Image (cartoon, rainbow, N blue to C red):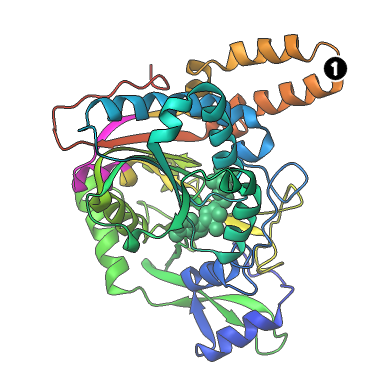
């Protein structure tokens, strides 16, 4: 990735200068996304949906949530059947964005399963105040009705307190990553600095940390992942998800019995860390378009990277999670009844062709292999009784 001219924001320059003139890419990504005043999510500027900067499956229409809700309901019922009667059941969502999924899930249960609705508490884990405000607005109706909805962080929850279904849809792709670059046969980190002459943001190579070195060596030893790959050209670049392991560990410790569903852009290691993928997977969106130069609008657009399937599965299993399955979103939604839903919409909206067409288009985007259909659903479980098996409609 070249250091293209950048449209700097004063706030960011000041922060970089305060930190000595150069910051790691990890810190850059953290600031532009999570800074409480200027960050894209931190400030609540993030604009999701078809009229915003980018769509997530839940922000397009309630149809995605309707199909996924069936699966979550089914998992909650199965978990409940394995509990003592006084143990509380939870649905926990990480990074709820504008609250679209949680709101649609509550609507689904209100219509389809009032019995389970009364037995479940709903928790959102969201570090960004700006997004919490959006979520509270979206969920206002349910809060007023006295539904058991709360915002929390993992530290506040007691260890092994959760009998739970956990959802993280497009959250891991928003966690800051380090950028790794191959220079003279050695790996370095890509940092972000300020050009003395133009005052613009530029990449600047900085040394690798011990923690990163250890993490990369571990992946080589356990998964045969080579960073850089053999014969990598000069400036081959990738990103490294330094926070995933600790994120999984923090969740694992809180679960008594439960299912963790991660939905995200994901690649197999052999495609991720390959010679042809020589610039990683980072991508930035604004107004439904890819922004090639992600220094262009710091704090005013999304910045996201794919996750690596094998490292995530390995880290989860290493902690003690069982992998229930990994499936493409398109296949998962078809198993959950997407075709029937399509048919139902066409019948229900016979007299409103334009609405029917837009719902149909949104549904098809969810399964389109070059769109959201290529997302992966990674399902993990943890049960007190290790022999417990769970049925999942989404994995056939
Ligand atoms: C792309 S949005 C996800 C949208 C949402 N899940 C949906 O289905 O539309 C990313 C969300 O993750 C949140 N986030 C960022 N870092 C997080 C973290 N460490 N833990 C939980 N949420 C986080 C962001 O504030 C934002 O709400």
x then y, percent, for residue 328:
47, 28
> Residue 282, can we see it?
no
- The magenta-colored residue range is 313-325
x then y, percent, for residue 276:
50, 45
Q: Nearer the viewer, residue 6 or 348?
A: 348
Q: Residue at x 74, y 73 (%)?
A: 7
Q: Nearer the viewer, residue 255 or 175?
A: 255
Q: Could you say whether the residue bearing mark 1 is in a helix, strand or loop?
A: helix
Q: Quadrant of residue 361?
A: top right
> Residue 9, can we see it?
yes
Task: Give the side of residue 47 with respect to residue 31, left or right.
Answer: right
Q: Residue at x 72, y 21 (%)?
A: 360
Q: Nearer the viewer, residue 268 or 236?
A: 268
Quarter of the image that includes the N terminus: bottom right
Q: Quadrant of residue 177?
A: bottom left
Task: Give the side of residue 160 with respect to residue 76, left or right.
Answer: left
> Is-magenta flag for residue 157?
no
x then y, percent, for residue 181:
45, 65
Q: Is mark 1 within 8 Å of ligand 1?
A: no
Q: Residue at x 63, y 80 (%)?
A: 12
Specify few, some or many for label 1: CA neighbours under 10 Å numbering under 14, 14-19, or 20 or more: few
Note whether 162 is above or below 348 in the view shown: below
| Residue denoted by label 1 | 353
x then y, percent, for residue 71:
44, 25
Quarter of the image that includes the C terminus: top left
> Is-magenta flag for residue 319?
yes
Q: Residue at x 18, y 27 (%)?
A: 388
């Amino acid at each position: 990735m070249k250091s293209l001219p950048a449209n700097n924001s004063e706030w960011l320059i000041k922060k970089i200068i305060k930190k000595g003139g150069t910051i790691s890419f990890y810190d850059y990504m953290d600031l532009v996304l999570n800074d409480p005043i200027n960050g894209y999510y931190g400030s609540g500027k993030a604009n999701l949906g078809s009229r915003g900067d980018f769509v997530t499956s839940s922000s397009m229409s309630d149809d995605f949530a309707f199909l996924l809700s069936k699966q979550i309901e089914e998992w909650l019922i199965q978990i409940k059947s394995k509990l003592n009667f006084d143990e509380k059941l939870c649905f926990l969502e990480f990074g709820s964005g504008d609250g679209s999924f949680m709101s649609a899930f509550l609507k689904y249960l209100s219509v389809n399963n009032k019995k389970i609705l009364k037995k479940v508490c709903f928790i959102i884990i969201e570090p960004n105040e700006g997004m919490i405000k959006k979520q509270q607005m979206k969920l206002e109706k349910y809060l007023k009705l006295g539904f058991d909805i709360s915002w929390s962080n993992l530290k506040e929850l007691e260890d092994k307190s959760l009998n739970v279904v956990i959802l993280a849809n497009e959250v891991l792709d928003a966690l800051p990553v380090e950028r790794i670059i191959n220079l003279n046969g050695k790996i370095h980190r890509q940092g972000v600095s300020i050009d003395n002459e133009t005052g613009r943001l530029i990449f600047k190579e900085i040394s690798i940390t011990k923690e990163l070195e250890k993490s990369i060596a571990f992946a080589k030893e356990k998964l045969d992942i080579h960073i850089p790959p053999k014969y990598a050209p000069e400036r081959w670049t990738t990103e490294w998800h330094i926070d995933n392991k600790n994120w999984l560990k923090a969740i694992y410790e809180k679960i008594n019995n439960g299912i963790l569903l991660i939905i995200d852009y994901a690649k197999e290691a052999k495609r991720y860390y390959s010679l042809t993928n020589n610039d990683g997977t980072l991508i930035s969106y604004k107004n439904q378009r890819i922004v090639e130069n992600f220094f262009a609008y710091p704090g005013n657009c999304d910045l996201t990277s794919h996750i690596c399937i094998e490292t995530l599965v390995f880290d989860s299993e290493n902690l003690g999670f069982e992998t229930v399955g990994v499936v493409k979103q398109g296949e998962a939604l078809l198993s959950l009844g997407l075709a029937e839903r399509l048919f139902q919409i066409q019948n229900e909206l016979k007299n409103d062709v334009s609405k029917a067409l837009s719902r149909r288009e949104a549904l098809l985007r969810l399964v389109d292999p070059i769109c959201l259909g290529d997302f992966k659903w990674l399902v993990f479980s943890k049960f007190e009784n290790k022999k417990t098996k769970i049925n999942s409609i989404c994995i056939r």
